[in-house]
Amino acid sequence: MTSYKEAQEVLMKELRLYHYPVAVKFFYDQAELDAFHAKAPEIHTPLKPMTFCQWELGARMKGQIVYSDMQGLGCGNAQFCFGWKGLDDGEIKGHAKYTRDLDQAERFVKSKSRLKEGLLGIAVAPLGSVDGLFEPDTVHFYCDNMQAYHLAVDYMAATDTHPLRPSITMNSSACGGNVFSYVEQEFNMLPACSGSYNAGKTERGEINVIIPGTKFGAMFDRLMDRINAASSSITRPGDGFPGADICKNCPLIIFKKEK
């Protein structure tokens, strides 16, 4: 991989992505954060506190570099996942509608992945904008089923990991999903949660695919190897993705050039 800009261009073209891949950076070092602010061409911040999945809207839909600390985060569940608040009665009661009782709600919340304390802020940006700015801690894709499958297969081949074991939690797909991938350094693939479906604007039925930044390059290089050998399509190598991924190898669905 020569650059994140190149990677984004290839992914958008070859996987027919609808949204920009989102590079996520968790800042713990003040000097690193200061350098980010000094180098970023333009940074957007939330006008009012909102959810983390809404922060990502600016990156994946509008191509903006978005940064915020805890003051711009209006989601208690995300605050808990990011280590910005401890477990309290409100967080437990907020999960009561999903669980059998409050005891189960408490156990489920406690089982979520969390960042260590001391997080200064978070940047989310289109992947193609972060060259020389920061190395992503995670790369978050909002994509459809077949795009997610291609990303998963290339990740498995590139990292020699099989099977994948994603982590799905209640009420924390975007926030908790990124935290799991970063903390465990593992691939994650999960549906929208009840909060991110509407708040995060995933009404198209997008699937979340999250890849640790340390392993993204290997996944991308695997994709490039397949492109150079045949095409980006796994379902029918040689066809462009999504190409003719209909009725695999069906002899009836064939087109020929008109004489």
Image (tube, grey):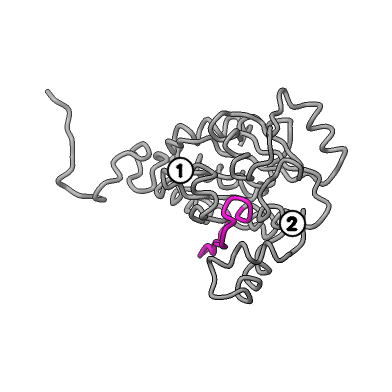
What residue is drawn where x is 62% and y is 29%?
Answer: 64
The answer to if 171 sits in the magenta stretch is yes
What residue is drawn where x is 42% and y is 36%?
Answer: 16
What residue is drawn where x is 60% and y is 34%?
Answer: 59
Query: Left or right: 127 with respect to 119?
Result: left
Classed neighbour count for the residue bearing mark 1: other residues with Cα under 10 Å, few (<14), some (14–19), many (≥20): some
Question: Image quadrant for the N terminus?
Answer: top right
- Residue 166 image offset from top left, x and y in percent: 54, 61
What residue is drawn where x is 76% and y is 45%?
Answer: 70
Measured in 3D between alpha carbons, the distance from the residue under mark 1 to the one under mark 2, in whole angstroms, is 35 Å
Q: Nearer the viewer, residue 15 or 34?
A: 34
Disc 1 residue type (three-letter): Arg
Going from N to C along the chain, the mark reached first, 1 or 2, is 2
The span shown in magenta is 159-177
| Residue beneath disc 1 | 226
Disc 2 residue type (three-letter): Leu
Above or below residue 180? Residue 60 is: above
| Residue beneath disc 2 | 115
The answer to if 193 sits in the magenta stretch is no
Q: Secondary structure at mark 2?
A: loop
Query: Left or right: 240 with respect to 198?
Result: left
Q: Secondary structure at mark 1?
A: helix
Q: Does residue 157 appear in this view?
A: no
Classed neighbour count for the residue bearing mark 2: other residues with Cα under 10 Å, few (<14), some (14–19), many (≥20): some
Q: Does residue 174 appear in this view?
A: yes
- Residue 242 image offset from top left, x and y in percent: 36, 40
- Residue 181 image offset from top left, x and y in percent: 63, 55
